Amino acid sequence: MFKERLLERIVRMEKDPNYRPDVLSVDVELQSILEYVGKILSTKQGSAIISYDFGIPDVTNFHDTSYGEYVENMEKSLEKTIMRFEPRLSNLKVQYAKQENQSTVMHFKIEAELSEHNNIPVMFETAIKPDGKVAIYE
C-alpha cells in the first residue's frame, strides 16, 4: 500500500520528476492520513459523489435523541466512516472528549495504529464546530 493517496502522488510527480512514493517517511504518510481524515470529517454524508456514506452525519440534527445517545452515535459513526475510508489506520478508537469551556464544539480523541508500520500508535484530536467545520490537532 502506498503512503499517500493517488492524487497526492500525481501532484508530487508533476512537481518532482525524481519522486519515489515507495521511499517516503512515516511522517509523510501520517500527514497524508490527517489531511484525508479532515476531508472525511468535513464532508456531510450524502453530499459526496464517491460514496453516499462518505463523511459524517449532520451534526446539527439530534433533536430526537438525548445528548448522551447522540454523542455515542457520533463516536460510532466517526469510527465506522474512518475505518471504511482510511485503510492506512487500524485498531481505531474514537472517544468523545468533553471540553468544559466549549459547549458548542464537539471534541473527539482518535487513537489508531499505522497499518503498514508494525502498528505504530497514533493519536490526534478533532473538533467539530456547529457550522460543520473541522479542525484536527496532532
Image: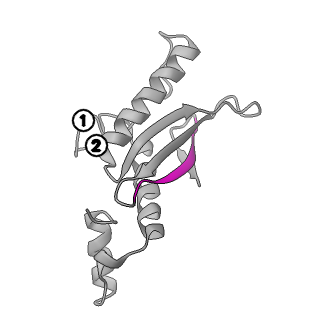
Residue 94: x percent and y percent?
50, 35
The secondary structure that most of the magenta stretch takes on is strand
Residue 31: x percent and y percent?
47, 63
Amino acid under label 1? Tyr
Q: Secondary structure at mark 2?
A: loop
Instruction: Give the number of callouts.
Output: 2
Badge 1 vs badge 2, beta-carbon distance below 8 Å: yes
The residue beneath circle 2 is 48
Residue 29 lies left or right of residue 51; in this view the side is right
Q: Residue at x 31, y 45 (%)?
A: 85
Q: Residue at x 41, y 62 (%)?
A: 32
Seen from this angle, which residue lies furthest bottom? 18
Amino acid under label 2? Ala
Q: Secondary structure at mark 1?
A: loop
Residue 121: x percent and y percent?
50, 52
Quadrant for the C terminus, please: bottom right
The residue beneath circle 1 is 52
What stretch of residues is rendered in magenta? 118-129
Quadrant for the N terminus, please: bottom left
Residue 73 lies left or right of residue 17; in this view the side is right
Q: Is residue 125 magenta?
A: yes
| Front-most of residues 47 and 33 | 33
User: Which color scheme did the rendering employ for the protein?
Assistant: one colour
Q: Is residue 20 magenta?
A: no
Q: Which mark is residue 135?
A: none
Q: CA distance from mark 1 to mark 2?
A: 6 Å
Other-residue count near label 2 (Cα within 10 Å), few / some / many at <14 / 14–19 / ≥20: few
